[in-house]
Amino acid sequence: MSKVRVHASISVDGFGAGPRQSRENPQGIGGLALGEWAFATRTFQQILGKDWTVEGVDRKDGGTTGIDDACFARSFENVGAWILGRNMFGPVRGPWPDDSWRGWWGDTPPFRAPAFVLTHYPRAALPLQGGTTFHFVTEGIERALERARAAASGRDICIGGIATVQQYVRAGLVDALYLAICPLLLGSGERLLGDIDLVRLGYGCTEYRAGERATHVVLKRVR
Amino acid sequence: MSKVRVHASISVDGFGAGPRQSRENPQGIGGLALGEWAFATRTFQQILGKDWTVEGVDRKDGGTTGIDDACFARSFENVGAWILGRNMFGPVRGPWPDDSWRGWWGDTPPFRAPAFVLTHYPRAALPLQGGTTFHFVTEGIERALERARAAASGRDICIGGIATVQQYVRAGLVDALYLAICPLLLGSGERLLGDIDLVRLGYGCTEYRAGERATHVVLKRVR
């Protein structure tokens, strides 16, 4: 049975994105720093430039191969489908003016699997290179999960986007959260966990790995 | 010039204490787990039983000597005075019924220096063994800091207690926060940082040390 997973980075003060997301700042002001631990890894460096471009982040030879790398690589392992919030897909709000926005990631997004984007506005599916097809789901989170589960063929489903993660967690639909706690402050923005009481929802911390540039914890349903 | 420091442990979800503090649960329900990283260290084991008793925590031979130990030891280095919130001193609320409550720590509290307890209700100073004298300050946080600074003779001042830490941070009076991020969830209780915007207050993360049982970060005024 496929699991529903979240992989996310948060600041010491709990933010999963900075304030004021825009085309220039996909993760909000200052939010790009939440990826620094990952950008340094071999796994990221190998796909960077080829599959993935991040403004201001250069491809280097090599990349680190320690705990951070292993944790970043894990976020792509055994993933059969993705569910993304509208803001994770792009900065466009309201009805789609046209089909010109194709995501933040260029022609070859890193998902390499069907990716279901939650939106209130219908849009035709958008197949891109490398195995990613964006599907736009207007029927809510349960229907998106059904479609993702069918598409995943037994592999796991990853949820991305803060408001979306919160909806799935509150609905009791997330099996595990893999968090990278980054040694930085954002001060404001979007808190990943908001005021969700994870203990009441049955979660416990089941893994702790102190990485080179971030600390990795796993939160799973333990009861 | 003495610095004003905070040393505190928080859960992955940001809580510095569990809910419902009581005589049986000085750190609230589940909050004792925030100390587990410290209890395992050599520094703690050396003073445990001698200077300090914690319900349910036994003294063992030895104790760990790695990063956690170094970070715990640092919380006692160069401290000339303490400022403690009323709840950190004890579970008594409202006027002091008598002088029978002498703190959570037995006859020899671990502070070994003057400790100024914020309260709305006057009480005579309480000298205990090992160098700790509790002074009760009814004139507010600025006056408590003045008195602590005078008592510290150039050494640093440590602030303890969540509501108290928040007051001093918001007032711009804290130079550095030394946080241990513990791989556990509390779900509810008291958030150490509440909704304080540390970036707006000028703080940045200046140190990251991945310990054996907790991750240690230092937040300092960087501008």
Image (tube, coloured by chain):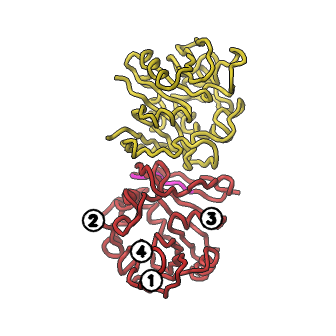
Chain colours: A red, B yellow
The residue at which mark 3 appears reads as A175
- Tag 1: amino acid: Gly
- Secondary structure beneath disc 2? loop
Q: Chain of mark 3?
A: A
Going from N to C along the chain, the mark reached first, 1 or 4, is 4
The image's mark for residue B68 is none
Badge 1 and badge 4 in a common chain: yes
Residue picked out by circle 4: A110
- The residue drawn where x is 50% and y is 70% is A77
Say whether residue A209 is left or right of residue A105: right
Amino acid at the residue labelled 4: Pro
Residue A210: % across, % down: 46, 50
For marks 3 and 1 on the same chain, the one whose residue lies earlier in the sequence: 1
Mark before the other along the chain sequence, 2 or 4: 2
Residue range corresponding to the magenta coloring: A213-218
For mark 1, give the secondary structure.
helix
Instruction: Inspect the image, locate mark 2, and give the three-letter code of the amino acid beneath it.
Output: Asp
- Given residues A93 and A7, the one toward you in this image is A93
Q: Do labels 2 and 1 touch, CB within 8 Å?
A: no
Is disc 2 surrounded by few (<14), some (14 to 19) or many (20+) residues within 10 Å? Answer: few
- Element assignment for label 4: loop
Q: Residue A58 — which label?
A: 2
Residue B58 position (above or below residue A96): above
Q: Chain of mark 1?
A: A
Contact, CB < 8 Å: mark 3 with mark 2?
A: no
Q: Give the left or right position of residue A115, taking residue A150 as reference.
A: left
Q: Which of disc 2 and disc 3 is earlier in sequence?
A: 2
Q: Is residue A37 visible?
A: no
Q: Are marks 2 and 4 in contact (CB under 8 Å)?
A: no
Give the position of the C terminus of chain A as an image quadrant.
Answer: bottom right
